């Protein structure tokens, strides 16, 4: 496994540096709290990092200080944690706020259509400036990597310039072979226009959803990604009318025709629930991220858990568009893999604030679970083995959170209650290995 190899390389590097004792190559950070991102907080903790920001060791400072007394050392207040991972961003919207005037699937589709239209009407320089501001805002909010869902690839260059890594999911829509072929040709042209493709940003073609993409196209796109061992994504259980559309067609299909364009003549309802249809298309798999899952029933959740499919929740966007939050307690009770996303390109879109939204709604849940979903959970869903956790071998980006003059007893809870704490980068992330 990649993570085993990373840990082995870190161990070898640490052994070599201990022999050489070159303080310029090693940093030792201590803090009242170290939050690994994939494990319990370490009180009075420390991490050892090389010059490139790769974690070589973590543990109690009482153990690491005597061993690395020769290293370059910084004693900090507050807490140390890994960079956040936003598993579902929309950076191409360039800071445009997503309106909440309409609810339901039709409302969401109209909103997205209007945002795209507004973006198209901007002059290229203004559009690029907005996108770059959005990317910078994500980095400033502590985001190390994203799963950027896009129709245009317009954020890729800004991501590269600002050192924001991750996976770009190039969405494909179309219910007929002609429409799908047109969308795929446009996607190929957009992809070919970015040369060279930047390091640290993986590219995936991904179907938009079961309600907007032909079943044969969904099967083909997901199948090709899985054959390569790559992670891909699809929207699922996004709204109640999605289920009506898939199971019954009829009025649901007619009502959606105006926003999807031509759907009425091309669409035939499969007659099953979303999860069954996805399974029939070969997409219920540990390598397929299920975005939103806002209206998922317990039975759908159980099937997702058995398949090992990661669930990417976007609570703020879903609450605004559907009026409900995803059934997080059900997800956790069934042992699902959970990650968080913003589904937005706002100037300060923060996956930590998404975790805070869930913390306020589900105060009975351990804050550690939510924080880990915002870090290691996102890296796990996106297949970014070197991100998301302060674990030997990884280079996830290292953040310092200032807690002022106090040391909280519950550091994860403090972060989530703070919502937008003062975060500073101690080390930026290294580009993840391309998959």
Image (cartoon, helix red, strand yellow):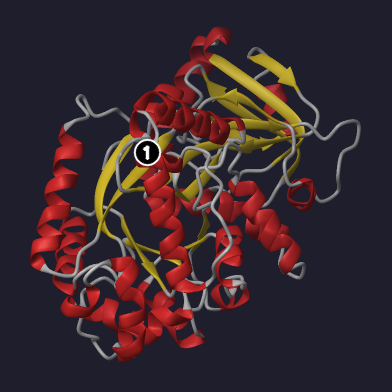
How far from the left and from the top, in percent, is residue 15?
48, 23
Vertical placement of residue 121 versus 26, above or below: below
Depth check, front residue: 264 or 143: 264
Quadrant holding the C terminus: top left
- In the image, 128: left or right of 406? left
* Residue at position x 42%, y 53% in the image: 114
* Residue at position x 64%, y 60% in the image: 369
Name the quadrant containing residue 44.
top right
Vertical placement of residue 418 versus 193, above or below: below
Depth check, front residue: 254 or 14: 254
Would residue 52 be seen by someone viewing this image from the given angle? yes
Task: Report which residue position mark 1 lands on.
Answer: 121
Would residue 38 be seen by someone viewing this image from the given angle? no
Depth check, front residue: 19 or 302: 302
Name the quadrant containing residue 245.
bottom left
Count of numbered circles on the image: 1
Q: Residues within 10 Å of mark 1 (few under 14, many from 20)?
A: few
Regarding mark 1 in the picture, which secondary structure is present there?
helix
* Residue at position x 90%, y 36% in the image: 406
Please identify the residue farthest to the right as the structure is shown: 405
- In the image, 260: left or right of 262? right
Vertical placement of residue 364 versus 40, above or below: below
How far from the left and from the top, in percent, is residue 341?
52, 53
How far from the left and from the top, in percent, is residue 415?
75, 46
- In the image, 168: left or right of 421? left
How far from the left and from the top, in percent, is residue 382?
39, 51
Vertical placement of residue 124 versus 299, above or below: above
Depth check, front residue: 342 or 262: 262
């Amino acid at each position: 496994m990649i993570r085993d190899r990373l840990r082995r390389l870190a161990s070898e590097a640490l052994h070599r540096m201990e022999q050489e004792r070159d303080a310029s190559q090693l940093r030792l950070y201590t803090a009242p709290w170290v939050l690994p991102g994939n494990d319990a907080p370490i009180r009075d903790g420390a991490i050892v990092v090389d010059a490139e920001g790769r974690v070589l060791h973590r543990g109690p400072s009482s153990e690491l200080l005597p061993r690395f007394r020769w290293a370059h050392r910084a004693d900090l207040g507050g807490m140390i944690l890994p960079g956040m991972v936003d598993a579902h961003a929309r950076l191409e919207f360039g800071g445009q706020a997503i309106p909440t005037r309409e609810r339901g699937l039709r409302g969401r589709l109209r909103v997205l259509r209007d945002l795209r239209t507004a973006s198209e009407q901007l002059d290229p320089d203004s559009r690029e400036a907005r996108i770059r501001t959005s990317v910078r805002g994500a980095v400033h909010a502590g985001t190390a990597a994203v799963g950027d869902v896009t129709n245009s690839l317009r954020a890729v260059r800004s991501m590269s310039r600002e050192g924001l890594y991750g996976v770009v999911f190039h969405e494909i829509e179309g219910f007929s072979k002609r429409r799908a072929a047109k969308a795929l040709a446009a996607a190929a042209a957009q992809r070919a226009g970015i040369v060279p493709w930047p390091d640290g940003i993986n590219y995936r073609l991904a179907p938009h959803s079961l309600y907007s993409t032909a079943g044969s196209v969904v099967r083909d796109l997901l199948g090709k990604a899985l054959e390569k061992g790559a992670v891909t994504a699809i929207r699922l259980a996004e709204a109640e009318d999605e289920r009506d559309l898939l199971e019954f067609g009829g009025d649901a299909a007619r009502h959606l025709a105006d926003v999807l364009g031509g759907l009425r003549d091309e669409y035939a309802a499969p007659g099953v629930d979303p999860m069954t249809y996805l399974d029939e298309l070969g997409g219920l798999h540990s390598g397929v991220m299920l975005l939103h899952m806002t209206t998922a029933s317990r039975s759908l959740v159980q099937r997702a858990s058995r398949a090992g499919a990661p669930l990417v929740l976007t609570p703020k966007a879903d609450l605004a568009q559907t009026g409900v939050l995803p059934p997080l307690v059900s997800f956790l009770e069934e042992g699902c893999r959970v990650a968080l996303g913003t589904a937005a390109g706002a100037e300060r879109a923060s996956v930590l604030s998404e975790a805070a939204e869930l913390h306020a709604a589900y105060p009975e849940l351990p804050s550690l679970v939510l924080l880990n979903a915002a870090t290691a959970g996102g890296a796990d869903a996106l297949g970014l083995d070197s991100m998301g956790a302060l674990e030997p071998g990884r280079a996830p980006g290292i953040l310092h959170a200032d807690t002022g003059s106090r040391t909280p007893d519950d550091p994860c809870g403090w972060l989530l209650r703070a919502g937008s704490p003062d975060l500073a980068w101690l080390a930026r992330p290294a580009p993840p290995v391309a998959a």
